[in-house]
Amino acid sequence: MFEKLPKRVTITEVGPRDGLQNEPEWVPTEVKAEFIRRLAATGLNKIEITSFVHPKWIPPLADCAEIGKRFSHMDDVETTALVPNMKGLEGATAAGIQEAAVFMSASETHNKKNINKSIDETLTQFAELIPEIKRRGMRAQAAISTAFGCPYEGEVDPDRVVSIARELLDYGADGISLGDTVGVGNPLQVKRLLERLLELLDAERVTMHFHDTQGTAVANAVASLEMGITRFDGAVGGLGGCPYAPGASGNVPTENLVYTFHGMGVETGIDLEKLLDVGAFIQEQLGHPLPSNGLKAYLGRKSHAESAAQPAS
Ligand code: HMG
Ligand code: MG
């Protein structure tokens, strides 16, 4: 066990997208901008900055054009954004986004509720959309949600996930992301699904996107690491959730991934302390506690150190 771990992994911070898409109150564009700037200064190599979706469906990201334009090109940070269709691709192209991430679900009900199409209709659409993304010189990432379970249908057949992945690769997707949208997967399930998926593509092209509803997200990431996976999504503070996935909680906190990976000798390039400070920043701006236990522990330590440094009165 743990004998052949990758030496280095890439974590994509999805807080500005998956995190903020779920916030009940409007987060001002300037706060989003400062959040992204601070994230970019932690050593992260990739940030999902927004989503070119309909503002009626996802009101918190209605400023996608502005955020996209301001942050599509940052030093040393690759940018990605969700793109559901041709209209979204026009927005992402105008903003200069480097990677367009198309997304669909492995379960029919979630797909319909999330993007208003059946799985077959979505695949038909992506058969044109993915080649068009490539023609425009962008990287095409393809995310499969509800890969480990659906909030409406329960269990999801791994055959379904693998056959969708095969189609998306046939259309030209550069990478596949497997999403545990509702955070119900376990490490054995991860291992079994990855064994199947890795028959289709190399581990370097696979990203794992875990939510932490059942507290299994870091264990699932470690199981993925053992399978040779080197790309993970995380959201600082454990921000996040899908408005069309009732009962799901936030993403795996990026700081929990970084802490675990570094402790196991796997490099991320991320400065954990700086990242935790960004978690403290966004928590303060949002005005409600974030779920991350890593962030809670950090803030507890900090406030203890500050009160110990106060002169006795
Ligand atoms: P629709 O209503 O079926 O779209 O929505 P339509 O093609 O019928 O068009 C209707 C109107 O929407 C038209 O405007 C279009 O121009 C406009 P009108 O002519 O009526 O004025 N429109 C758009 N406007 C802006 N941006 C667009 C766009 N497309 C059409 N891209 C649509 C279909 C996909 C747009 C809608 O369902 C939608 O925006 N859904 C958002 C879903 C979403 O963002 N969910 C959360 C992210 S997924 C997630 O969190 C999971 C993930 O994290 C992985 C995991 O956790 O597993 C990725
Ligand atoms: Mg998600």
Image (cartoon, rainbow, N blue to C red):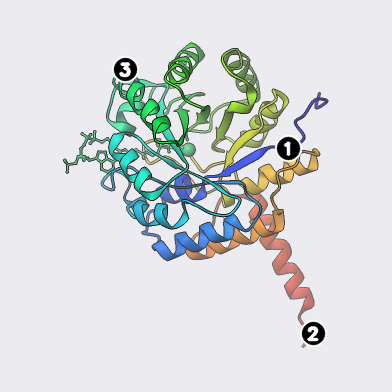
Q: Between 85 and 219, which is closer to the camera in this rendering?
A: 85
Q: Which residue in the rendered view is the most extreme toward the bottom?
A: 313
Q: Could you classify mark 3 by the number of other residues whose Cα lies within 10 Å: few (under 14), some (14-19), or many (20 or more)? A: few
Residue at 60%, 12% (x, y): give it: 199
Horizontal side, residue 149 vs residue 126: left or right = right
Q: Quadrant of residue 311?
A: bottom right
Identify the amino acid type marked 3: Asp
Residue at 46%, 29% (x, y): give it: 142
Q: Could you classify mark 2 by the number of other residues whose Cα lies within 10 Å: few (under 14), some (14-19), or many (20 or more)? A: few
The answer to which of marks 1 and 2 sits earlier in the sequence is: 1
Q: Position of residue 308 (x, y in %)?
A: 78, 74
Between circles 1 and 2, the one closer to the viewer is: 1
Q: The N terminus lies in which quarter of the figure?
A: top right
Identify the amino acid type marked 2: Ala
Q: Between 295 and 38, which is closer to the camera in this rendering?
A: 38
Alpha-carbon distance for marks 1 and 2? Answer: 46 Å
Residue at 57%, 31% (x, y): give it: 207
Q: Which mark is residue 312?
A: 2
Q: Which residue is mark 1?
A: 8
Q: Quadrant of residue 276?
A: bottom right
Identify the amino acid type marked 1: Arg
Q: Secondary structure at mark 1?
A: loop
Q: Secondary structure at mark 3?
A: helix
Q: Between 231 and 154, which is closer to the camera in this rendering?
A: 231
Q: Which residue is mark 3?
A: 120
